[in-house]
Amino acid sequence: SAKSEKEPEKLVLFHERFFMTRQVPIGVLISGSGTNLQAIIDAIEAKKLDAKIHVVLSNRADAYGLVRAKNHGVPTEVLDHKRFPSREAFDQAMVDALRAREVELAVLAGFMRLLSPVFVSAYSNRIMNIHPALLPSFPGLHVQRKAIEHGVRFSGCTVHFVNEQCDEGPIIIQAVVPVFPDDTEESLSARILKQEHRIYPQAIQFYSEGRLRVEGRKVFVDGVAREENQVLVQPPLAR
């Protein structure tokens, strides 16, 4: 395929430090409604996110996220995992599809399949995922229900780089929300989802500005102010 035109770079000032930003080419992987995809599209269109979606890739032809993408003129592609003889064969097809579109960063937005080493090694430290809990607590599925059943006072969401273990990769950014005694799985999920839509575009923006540095399990974000007085207490302390 023909090489895409190089996107212009610009300087952005953060806390007295300059960072080079560019329109990073991303591919978004979905399996369902695509609300985080919509948040990413909205952030790009509002010029709050320096990225360009080169393709929205789904393993389900009926995923509503495909409609969202088409409504904004974003290219889409469907790869049905059931048509492939193995997880590795399917993952290689996804890698080939992303590379054909010159995707640099793979963004999982409600993509309901575990990635094999075939995919992870092809895009090492260039795959992001969002999880509706404060990892490493409550990995896997139905995590809002697990948080309520466990009686935690706080939950939230996590954007992390993907490695070969489920929900185990280095953490980029987290948001915290309160959990109330009368919360249902639905009410807590809605509260967390609002924060997902805020932090996922921010994580991608950090990447586009070249501010993320992975060292072992830690992700360092350059140019972030240190605010040591950020404290959350639930229930609140008596005044």
Image (cartoon, helix red, strand yellow):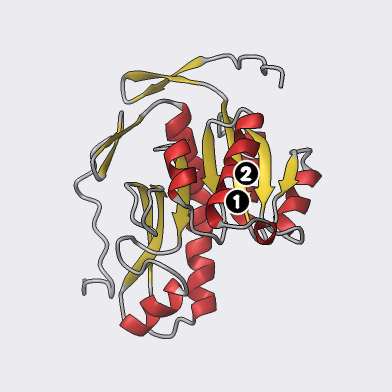
Which quadrant would the C terminus be assigned to in this image?
bottom left
Residue 53 at x, y percent in the picture: 64, 35
Residue 182: where, in percent of width, then height? 43, 85
Decide which of 161, 208 is in the foreground and name it.
Answer: 161
The extreme front residue here reads: 85
Please state which amino acid type lies under the numbered disc 2. Answer: Ala
Q: Quadrant of residue 147?
A: bottom left
Q: Considering only vertical position in the picture, is 3 above or below 65?
A: above
Q: Residues within 10 Å of mark 2 (few under 14, many from 20)?
A: some
Can you see residue 129? yes
Tell me the residue at 70%/51% (across/down).
79
| Count of residue discs | 2
Decide: is 226 above or below 199. Answer: above
The residue depicted at 42 percent of the width and 68 percent of the height is 140
Asked whether residue 180 appears in the rendered view, the answer is: no
In the image, residue 130 lies at what x, y percent? 47, 54
* Pointer 1 residue: 90
List the residue tagged with mark 2: 93
In terms of secondary structure, where does tag 1 sit?
helix
Q: CA distance from mark 2 to mark 1?
A: 5 Å
Residue closer to the observer: 160 or 81: 81
Q: Residue at x 52, y 35 (%)?
A: 105
